[in-house]
Amino acid sequence: MFSFNFRLGVIVLVFLSGHQAFAAPMGFEGSVMTMGDFNQNWREVGFNYAITSRDALGLTHLEFRSDDGKDKRQVDTLNYTRLLSRWNSSDAQSNLWLFMGIGEVRGSANNQSIDSKVIASSGFQFDYETRRVYFATTHKLYRASNLNHDTTSIRAGFSFYEADYDQTQPWFILETKYTNQISDKIEVIPMLRLINKNIFLEGGVNNSGQPRLNLMYTF
């Protein structure tokens, strides 16, 4: 289950090409953003199309599991992303995003298969960024009958130096993440982020010793 979709996600992300990428969850009007987030217990692949400068529609495939491997979930959703508000200053920008999704969840609990269910996914993200500092907090609800896999993450970091558009800019990012009913642990991940034009790449190792890879590509 995990290996097939992991390979598929990597193939899709490697071969897509484009013009510009952001840490934001959607790109400019008319663009397609591809996304991938991979570690041992969480693997997510998706894309969205920006139908306006504030609205995007997309699809996401998500697989996650407990630390002991006994609880596993597969989630496929149709998603809507909305930029609710944006604040600009001379050297900074902040955004408030709304997420909504509907789809299917399946998997196993205590190594016993569970019936396929309809799942609703909604949430928000607030972020603030200058050319030197970054902060974001995200909360997403994953709700189905007798299931609550809400996920919360907080990210903060800084760039090592300012860079022009056509140069690679390195950042240090520290993320904390928690998923309800899957793990009792709060995941802590220090990462190196590289941004260059349309490419966004993050990599690190969490507090359980698991590698983490996060990619975005916009075209």
Image (spheres, rainbow, N blue to C red):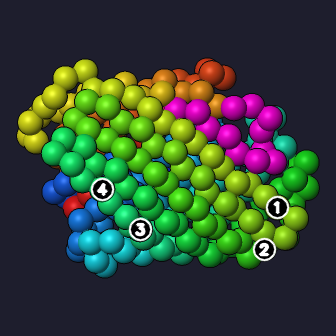
Image side of residue 15 versus residue 112, left or right: left
Q: Residues within 10 Å of mark 1 (few under 14, many from 20)?
A: few
Kindly indicate the quadrant of the structure image that contains residue 163: top left
Q: Disc 1 to disc 4, how far (Cα)?
A: 36 Å
Residue sitting at 70 percent across and 54 percent down?
A: 150
Residue sitting at 16 percent across and 45 percent down?
A: 90
Q: Amino acid at mark 2?
A: Lys
Q: Which residue is mark 4?
A: 87
Q: Amino acid at mark 4?
A: Trp
Kindly indicate the quadrant of the structure image that contains residue 179: top right
Q: Is residue 205 covered in magenta?
A: no
In the picture shown, does residue 106 fall above or below 191?
Answer: below
The answer to the question of whether label 1 and label 2 lie on touching residues, with beta carbons closer than 8 A, is: yes
Frontmost residue, 5 versus 204: 204
Numbered range of the magenta stretch: 175-186
Q: Position of residue 172 (x, y in %)?
A: 37, 24
Q: Which residue is mark 1?
A: 147
Q: Which residue is mark 3?
A: 84
Name the element at disc 1: strand
Q: Disc 3 to disc 4, how far (Cα)?
A: 11 Å
Mark before the other along the chain sequence, 2 or 4: 4
Q: Amino acid at mark 3?
A: Leu
Image side of residue 196 versus residue 50, left or right: left
Mark before the other along the chain sequence, 3 or 2: 3
Q: Amino acid at mark 1?
A: Leu
Q: Which residue is mark 2?
A: 117
